[in-house]
Image (cartoon, rainbow, N blue to C red):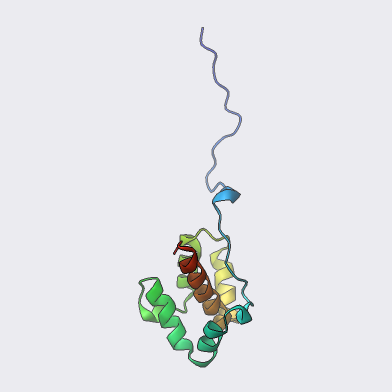
Amino acid sequence: MAVPSVVTIQPQYGMAVPAASRSMWQTGLMDCCSDCGVFCCGLFCFPCLGCQVAGDMNECCLCGTSVAMRTLYRTRYNIPGSICSDFCVTMWCLTCSVCQIKRDINRRKELGIF
């Protein structure tokens, strides 16, 4: 006689992603001094930095500084966060946001995971 299997954990909609498959930002939002080249580009030629970020992600140059770009990047690399947090970061510190994305791209390129 077959023994019925008992399900102890039910699958759920929107279940959290296991921590092992999550990634983190390579640098913090305010780690501007960790890459002075990116910081200076963001400070003195912000549109150029936005175009670099968009180009790295094969997107339109006009999208490089948007909430959508930050959300796309974050979801592509499974970085925890929300659209609300992306909006807040880009609303209150757009330069820091774009610099963080560019630093992250550079670090991921160095690691071969971009």
Residue at the (55%, 81%) spot, across then down: 94
Residue 104 at x, y percent in the picture = 52, 70
Tally of numbered tags: 0
Residue occupying the point 46% across, 71% down: 68
Q: Position of residue 40 (x, y in %)?
A: 54, 88
Residue 35: image x %, image y %? 57, 80
User: Where is 96 relative to 3, above or below?
Assistant: below
Q: Is residue 68 left or right of residue 39?
A: left
Seen from this angle, which residue lies furthest top?
A: 1
Q: Quadrant of the C terminus?
A: bottom left
Relative to 64, does residue 45 appear above or below in the rendering?
below
Rendered residue at 46%/83% (across/down): 49
Residue extending farthest to the bottom is 44
Q: Residue at x 59, y 74 (%)?
A: 88
Task: Please state the horizontal and vertical placement of residue 44, each as a whole percent of the image.
Answer: 52, 93
Residue 59, above or below 1: below
Instruction: Classify residue 31 by image quadrant.
Output: bottom right
Q: Is residue 3 above or below residue 80?
A: above
